[in-house]
């Protein structure tokens, strides 16, 4: 009995006897079970690694070796790039690439020196890129570390700072690369702060504040969050971090913050703090997904520490050129971010008119729960894919999302209308 109670089951006081065996009726809410089981995540992982569970119905023979990402549209286009023209026949709203083009200065710079950029080794540690980013963000170059996309920095920095004995708090739901790295790669002790659909997946500040008493080594936040699109304002987050124990470090992923406002970034705060790290991908807000450019902002001491185990030439020469030219074109991007807010609002209105429950986000995507008349997320994704539309089933990105949650990237106005038309016809929402 004690074993079952420890994982959250509660007795109803009803018993049945079969021979020498006594059965007792027990039950629990799914959210309660997940909360209790998260305390035993490391034990469960050790069990999975040491026990051969092949042949047991419903159990995987081996665990996934990598985190699942979107990009299913490459199955249609072809990942050997011999039929790239097929890209014109699909809408890739399952990944969060920018709907707009890179700044003209970015494209022109690469066109002028493409052959040189392809055959030439880049600056070893992205020194010029670090300088350009630091100048644009008002911090020291020594507070910037570059990487080949935010995932590169997640794997590099967190694997250096987090150990199997570390206690880490993450959001649920949240970009699942973090859970993968922390639990499957590092084996850290991970707890989840569950975000409720009832409250619009907003972070409960009091709940977060209360969690600090558990003595976490790291608190990992994506802000604005993915897949929810919800944002915790900078001043509120600064106040919360000030209340945390000095030994607790914060990792803030600000990949989407520019869609809210550049002023909402914590980069300047991180550059002068001993316990705050900001990571920013340049893929989503700067239309540079293909060149894999990102950076981390932290105190010079933390950056020096991370440089010791960071690989040289992390960002390609085309990536470094593109990043530098992008930061020289901020007016262009600011205009695109403002347009994105308008397009997002139009897409949300169109979805709600079809009966979707849309979470009011602030990035370049929307988290949506399917109308009751539609199939579940898995089936709906398959139905619209057959018509050339790719959207993301995000039910696995959190324990409380249910089976009807999808994420849809914001596109240009014409493409957004195509998205709405396909959803309506394929799912019978007209």
Image: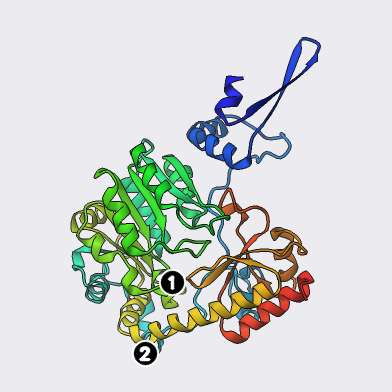
Residue at 30%, 79% (x, y): give it.
324
Quarter of the image for residue 28 reads top right
Mark 1 crowdedness (10 Å alpha carbons): few <14, some 14-19, many ≥20: many
Question: Mark 2: which secondary structure?
Answer: helix
Inter-mark Cα distance, 2 to 1 = 22 Å
Q: Is residue 82 visible?
A: no
Tell whether 408 sits left or right of 287. right
SS at circle 1: helix
Residue 379 seen in the figure: yes
Left or right position of 419 against 222: right
Could you say where residue 146 lies in the image, as x and y percent from the top left? Answer: 31, 65
**Image quadrant where one finds the C terminus:** bottom right
Residue 17, given in percent of the width and then of the height, sits at: 79, 15
- The image position of residue 110, as x and y in percent, is 38, 85
Quarter of the image for residue 23 reads top right
Residue that lies at the very extreme toward the top in this rendered image? 20
Earlier-in-chain disc, 2 versus 1: 2
Q: Residue at x 40, y 89 (%)?
A: 104
In the rendered view, tell whether residue 137 sits above or below residue 17.
below
> Residue 32, percent across and down?
57, 38
Q: Residue at x 28, y 55 (%)?
A: 276
Q: How is the image coloured?
A: rainbow
- Judge depth for marks 2 and 1 and give the one in front: 1
Quarter of the image for the N terminus: give it. Answer: top right
Q: Which mark is residue 317?
A: none
Q: Are marks 2 and 1 in contact (CB under 8 Å)?
A: no
Which residue sits at x=39%, y=37%? 164
Q: Which mark is residue 112?
A: 2
Task: Looking at the picture, tell me which residue is in the foreground, 218 or 286.
Answer: 218
Q: Which mark is residue 283?
A: 1
Left or right of residue 371, residue 338 in this image = left
């Amino acid at each position: 009995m004690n074993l079952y109670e420890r994982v959250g089951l509660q007795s109803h006081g009803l018993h049945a006897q079969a021979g020498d065996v006594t059965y007792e009726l027990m039950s629990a809410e799914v959210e309660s079970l997940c909360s209790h089981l998260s305390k035993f995540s490391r034990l469960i992982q050790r069990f999975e690694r040491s026990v051969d569970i092949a042949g047991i119905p419903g159990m995987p023979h081996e665990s996934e070796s990598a985190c699942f990402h979107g990009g299913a549209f490459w199955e249609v286009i072809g990942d050997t790039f011999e039929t790239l023209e097929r890209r014109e026949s699909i809408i890739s709203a399952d990944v969060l690439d920018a709907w707009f083009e890179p700044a003209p200065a970015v494209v022109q710079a690469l066109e002028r020196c493409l052959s040189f950029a392809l055959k030439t080794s880049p600056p070893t540690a992205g020194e010029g890129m670090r300088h350009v980013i630091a100048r644009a963000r008002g911090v020291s170059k020594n507070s910037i570390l570059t990487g080949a996309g935010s995932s590169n920095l997640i794997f590099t920095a967190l694997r250096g700072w987090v150990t199997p004995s570390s206690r880490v708090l993450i959001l649920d739901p949240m970009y699942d690369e973090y859970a993968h790295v922390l639990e499957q790669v590092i084996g850290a002790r991970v707890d989840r702060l569950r975000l409720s659909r009832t409250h619009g997946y907003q972070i409960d500040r009091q709940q977060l504040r209360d969690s600090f008493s558990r003595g976490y080594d790291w608190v990992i936040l994506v802000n604005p969050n993915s897949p929810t699109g919800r944002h915790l304002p900078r001043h509120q987050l600064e106040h919360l971090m000030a209340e945390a124990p000095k030994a607790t470090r914060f990792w803030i992923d600000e990949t989407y913050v520019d869609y809210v406002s550049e002023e909402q970034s914590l980069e300047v705060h991180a550059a002068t703090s001993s316990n705050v790290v900001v990571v920013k991908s340049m893929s989503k807000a700067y239309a540079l997904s293909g060149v894999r450019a990102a950076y981390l902002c932290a105190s010079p001491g933390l950056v020096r520490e991370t440089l010791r185990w960071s690989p040289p030439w992390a960002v390609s020469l085309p990536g470094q050129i593109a990043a530098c030219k992008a930061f020289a074109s901020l007016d262009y991007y600011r205009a695109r971010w403002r347009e994105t807010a308008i397009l997002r609002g139009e897409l949300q209105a169109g979805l709600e008119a079809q009966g979707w429950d849309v979470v009011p986000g602030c990035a370049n995507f929307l988290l949506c729960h399917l109308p009751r008349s539609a199939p579940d997320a898995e089936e709906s994704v398959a139905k619209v894919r057959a018509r050339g539309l790719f959207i993301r089933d995000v039910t696995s990105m959190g324990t409380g999302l249910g089976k009807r949650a999808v994420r849809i990237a914001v596109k240009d106005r014409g493409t957004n209308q195509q998205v709405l038309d396909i959803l309506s016809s394929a799912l019978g929402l007209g």
